[in-house]
Structures are given as C-alpha cells and as structure tokens.
Image (cartoon, rainbow, N blue to C red):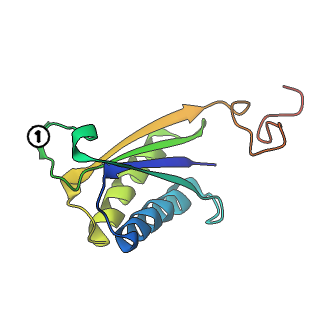
Amino acid sequence: MPLVKINLLEGRSTSEKYAIAAAVQAALVTNLGVPDADRYQIFNEFPADNFRHTDSYLGLNYTEQLLIIEITFLVGRTDEIKKALLADINRNLVAAGVVSSDDVFVTITEIGLANISFGGGLAQRAPADA
C-alpha cells in the first residue's frame, strides 16, 4: 500500500522518472515485503520558483537534482526496517545515476489500518471487527 509522492524540479526526462520510480519501488519491495504490483507513485514537478530549498543543511549539499520523497504506509514496521528502507532508496537512486547521495530527502508517514481504502469504500486492511 505504500503511497509514494516524488517532488522534484521540472525538467527530468521520462527515462529519469522511470529510473527514480523503479529505484524507490525496488527498495519498498525489498524492505517492506510489498509485492511489486503494489505500486502507487505520484510525481509532482515544480517550476523553480515553486521548488525552494536550502543549499545545505546538516552537512549535506543540495543541488537542482534534489528529490523530496514522501512515503505513506501502514503502521507496524520497526525503526530498523525504516532505516534500511531509507538507506536502500538512497543507494538505489545513486546507483541509477539520477542523483547524488545528498539529493535524496525522504519522509515517512505511517497510518492506521482503517485509514486507507483501495476502492469500493472499504478499509480492506482493517480488521473486520474494528
């Protein structure tokens, strides 16, 4: 169920966006155990005047290639799993040649089992008695 929003400066090619999507999905499959078919990704492209960030923070240096990735998934994963996911996302994106290691900013939001519907007005992941 992970929902991934990838925020970036406009101008990336279709092949770059495909590589970004594949790199993130591979990390989700590996670390969260979701099937590859469980893919929900949204690319939000912004003109420069609407995509603002600091040049550096916490010893990191950001460029125009910065990706701000928001991931929402169901509660229940350990901090170790989330840290491994963050590391794999970064490693995969760098290996794909679409960013430097510093240009991967990720946030994770966890939601309850009754807080998602895949359609039909049902909370498919919530226990039946809840």
27 vs 1, left or right, is left
Q: Which residue is mark 1?
A: 56
What is the x, y in percent for residue 77? 55, 41
Task: Return the residue nearer the eye: 105 or 13.
Answer: 13
Q: Is residue 46 above or below residue 11?
A: above
Q: Which residue type does callout 1 highlight?
A: Ser
Few, some or many residues within 10 Å of mark 1 (<14, 14–19, 20+): few
Residue 98 in the figure: left or right of residue 85: left
Q: Secondary structure at mark 1?
A: strand
Whether 65 is drawn above or below 51: the answer is below
Q: Is residue 122 left or right of residue 114?
A: right
Q: Residue at x 66, y 65 (%)?
A: 37
User: Residue most toward the right?
Assistant: 129
**Looking at the image, which residue is at 70% across and 36% down?**
116
Residue at image coords 89%, 33%? 128
List the single residue furthest toward the top: 130
Residue toward you, 79 or 12: 12
Q: Relative to 43, is 128 above or below?
A: above
Compared across the picture, whether 98 is left or right of 80 comes to left
The correct choice, above or below, for 47 with respect to 93 in the image is: above
Q: Where in the figure is residue 68, as x and y percent of width and height? A: 33, 45
> Which corner quadrant of the image does residue 56 belong to?
top left
- Please state the horizontal and vertical placement of residue 38, each as a whole percent of the image: 65, 58
Quadrant location of residue 70? top left
Q: Position of residue 98 (x, y in %)?
A: 28, 66
The C terminus, quarter of image: top right
Q: How many marks?
A: 1
Q: Nearer the viewer, residue 7 or 113?
A: 7
